[in-house]
């Protein structure tokens, strides 16, 4: 039977905590390293609905992409939702582990899974490579099987990603032929300039803010060059495809050492936005 320590060791062989950003909080949040682990739930967010799913399924461990305490804390009292979550997990003998920016830059990592989900083929290379290893880094660049109108790629991306209330937002000529695509799971507007310099036809990411996106589009239209079209997806949706890949890699890695675990990917939609509506529909 595997222990939590065995699982953590395998996770960190795939997603080394040393690769995480200095501001990040990755690793084991709660749990006894010696406790048995046979069922592992993978989810994007450590929230109450995911904890409830883990309890119902009988999970011993939750692996999430997003940290619970990103800025640290001095208390886990059950007077806040985060404190209550910690109490719930401990009472039910469920450990919590986070792989965040270390999973973003891993090879394969979050953006590799996103690239495959939206139909990219061929070798995937980092959009912004790590200084110490060019195989790792933020984002990925790949290609479609053949040149495709932007509108058809948008349809392909929408079909490949889990549905959310916000769907996809697009900036660009929908009839434009696109082939070379950059993607970055999670918030990606810091990579707008990098995507443009890479000469891709489309940059798909999440959390694009108005001013950076507007200036990016205007620069391309104003004669500074034919920049990429933009596709803005929900943050949660761009990171969810990684869960299945992480679960598969963990299970296969443990199995190679004679340890068998059961994994499950949470389908609970934890995107913050629950609906879109016109103002008159809400009156």
Image: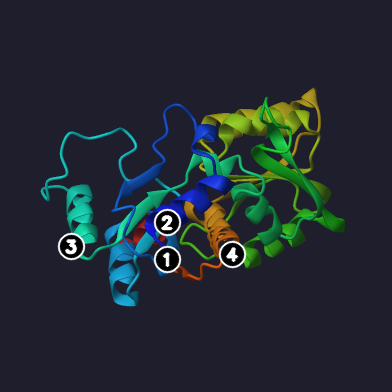
**The N terminus is located in which quarter?**
bottom left
Q: Earlier in the sequence, mark 1 or mark 2?
A: 1
Kindly report the distance in space between the C-alpha atoms of the residues bearing marks 4 and 1. 11 Å
Per the image, label 3 sits on a secondary structure element best described as: helix
Q: Does the residue at mark 1 contact the one at mark 2 (Cβ under 8 Å)? A: yes
Task: Please state the horizontal and vertical placement of residue 16, each as a whole percent of the image.
Answer: 54, 40
Q: Does the residue at mark 4 contact the one at mark 3 (Cβ under 8 Å)? A: no
Per the image, label 2 sits on a secondary structure element best described as: strand
- Image point 40% across, 62% down: which residue? 275
**Is 48 displayed left or right of 157 in the figure?**
left
Q: Earlier in the sequence, mark 2 or mark 4?
A: 2
* Quarter location, residue 88: bottom left
| Numbered mark located on residue 40 in the image | 1
Residue occupied by mark 3: 91
Task: Please state the horizontal and vertical placement of residue 183, each as a whole percent of the image.
Answer: 67, 45
- Image point 63% across, 32% down: which residue? 191
Kindly report the distance in space between the C-alpha atoms of the residues bearing marks 2 and 4. 13 Å
Vertical placement of 160 versus 16: above or below? Answer: below
Q: Does the residue at mark 1 contact the one at mark 3 (Cβ under 8 Å)? A: no
Taking the image as drawn, is residue 155 in sight? yes
Residue occupied by mark 4: 248
Q: Earlier in the sequence, mark 4 or mark 3?
A: 3
């Amino acid at each position: 039977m595997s222990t939590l320590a065995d699982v953590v060791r395998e996770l960190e062989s795939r997603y080394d905590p040393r690769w995480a950003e200095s501001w990040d909080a990755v690793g084991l949040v709660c749990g006894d390293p010696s406790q048995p682990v046979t069922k592992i739930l993978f989810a994007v967010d450590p929230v109450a609905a995911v904890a409830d799913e883990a309890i119902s399924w009988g999970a011993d461990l939750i692996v999430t992409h997003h940290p619970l305490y990103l800025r640290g804390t001095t208390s886990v009292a059950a007077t806040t939702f985060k404190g209550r979550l910690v109490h719930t997990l401990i009472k039910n003998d469920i450990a919590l582990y986070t792989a965040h920016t270390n999973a973003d830059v891993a090879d394969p990592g979050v953006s590799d899974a996103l690239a495959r989900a939206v139909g990219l083929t061929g070798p995937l290379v980092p959009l912004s490579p790590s200084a110490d290893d060019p195989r790792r880094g933020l984002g990925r660049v790949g290609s479609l099987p053949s040149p495709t109108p932007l509108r058809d790629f948008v349809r392909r991306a929408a079909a490949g990603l889990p549905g959310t209330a916000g769907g996809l937002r697009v900036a660009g000529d929908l009839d434009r032929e696109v082939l070379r695509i950059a993607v970055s799971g999670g918030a990606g507007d810091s990579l707008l300039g990098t995507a443009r310099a890479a000469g891709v036809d489309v940059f798909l990411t999440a959390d694009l803010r108005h001013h950076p996106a507007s200036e990016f589009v205007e620069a391309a239209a104003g004669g500074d060059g034919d920049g990429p079209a933009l596709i803005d997806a929900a943050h949660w949706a761009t990171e969810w495809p990684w869960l299945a890949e992480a679960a598969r890699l963990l299970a296969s890695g443990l199995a190679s050492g004679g340890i068998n675990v059961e994994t499950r990917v949470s389908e609970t939609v934890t995107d913050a936005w629950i609906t879109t509506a016109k103002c008159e529909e809400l009156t």
